[in-house]
Amino acid sequence: MNSHLGDIANFSQALISTKDVCIWVPSKLIVVHHLPVPKAPRRKWSELVPWMLEDKLLQTPEDMHFVIVGKSKDKLTVYAAAKNQMQEWQGSVKTLGSESFQFIPDYLALPWHSGLLSIGKRDEHYLVRYGEYEGFSTNAELAWHMIEDILQESETPLSLSISMPIDELPEGIPEELIDKIEIKHLEIDWQQSSFPKNANLLQGEFSLGPNSYGLMSWLKTAALLVLALILSFATLNIENNRLEDEIVYLGEQNRSAFYSLFPGLTIRAGDIRATVETYISNRFRQRESLESEAMQTLTILDSAMSECDCEIKGIRWNNKSLELILPQSLISVVEQLDFDGYRKQINTEPGDNIRLTLNQEYGR
């Protein structure tokens, strides 16, 4: 069970008592930095980061909290937030009685994979995620300008995921990007749990100690050991729920890939494989129909009569011959028509009509 910190007034007792609950914190108060990997040993990185960022900070390094959340090639991804802000957030949650929680930047609630730009909206702020850890939150006036920078800097074309009504997208989003929407939701799913686990801001001096997790006294711990077998079934159930969430997430990925390969095609009954097999089978049947003798004859007929404003009173396929009933007044026009590869025969019909018969000339 997860919740946004902005909804703290609506926290339920079930949320407060849940262990490691995810609290989405406002990413507008968090800055993402990319730094070259220090040459010092890894255990020294956390000490060096504040001074490597000193020239980029509005506050002194001592007043800032830094978390190294990822490493890619020769770059570190670092989150930075003011310590007094972290203390305020932590105090707000602990006041309600919760002792086991995580602080995750709220834009990480948006879906993401390589090549995807994800946009959502909370209140009057737009949330944007464009990397495993990268993203931001901003107001409507700046949203499009920042998104435009991402599109210009991207080395590959991006597709779009939206978690908001499409008519509320930031002004300026190009139509060609809107046409590449992979995932569409009306709002952000705050309950999804596929965010990077090491993006938790509660690290270092803000880590929750053993007491903060509400561990039992040694007597209660001893009692829990006796009940370990019973609790193992609960653990199995939690693991099953986690696997179900992962299956749903992978299903969304499959759906995104499906719509990229087959734009305009709808998944029937939720079965991607059956839909693709039916689609391919139908295309083969269409191809066989187009190659039939009747369809080839109709194609030749359409080509020959495309410029003739002729009234056709009847048409029939009879024993590998195409018969058309036309008004008697068109006999001179019909006599001049040429049907490549077909032998033409004209007969008089009752009621001032003529019958045009086309037979394929085999062996040509």
Image (cartoon, grey):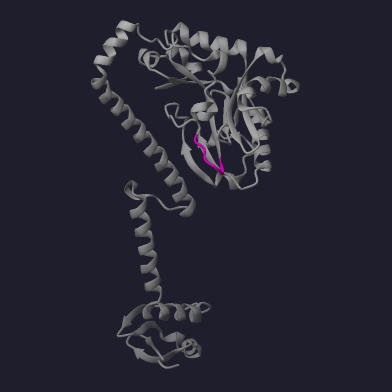
Q: Is 331 rendered above or below residue 49? A: below
Q: Would you say residue 53 is visible in this rendering? A: no
Where is residue 222? Give x, y as percent.
29, 10
Question: Dividing the picture into quarters, in which one does residue 238 lie?
Answer: top left
Q: Nearer the viewer, residue 291 or 214?
A: 214
* Residue at the bottom extreme, as displayed: 363
Q: Is residue 143 left or right of residue 101?
A: right
In what quadrant of the picture does the C terminus appear?
A: bottom left
* Residue at the right extreme, as displayed: 55
Q: Is residue 86 left or right of residue 277?
A: right
Where is residue 277? Give x, y as percent.
35, 59
Residue 113: in magenta span: yes
Q: Would you say residue 276 is visible in this rendering? A: yes
In what quadrant of the picture does the N terminus appear?
A: top left
Residue drawn at 46 percent across, 85 percent down? 330
Q: Is residue 308 left or right of residue 144?
A: left
Residue drawn at 52 percent across, 11 percent down? 90
Residue drawn at 36 percent across, 12 percent down? 13
Where is residue 347? Give x, y as percent.
37, 91
Main SS, magenta region, reads loop
Q: Is 136 rendered above or below residue 5? A: below
Where is residue 157? Give x, y as percent.
61, 48
Q: Nearer the viewer, residue 328 or 136?
A: 136
Q: Nearer the viewer, residue 337 or 39?
A: 39
Span colored in magenta = 111-116
Residue 1: in magenta span: no
Residue drawn at 45 percent across, 85 percent down? 329
Q: Is 315 rendered above or below residue 185? A: below
Q: Nearer the viewer, residue 160 or 61?
A: 61
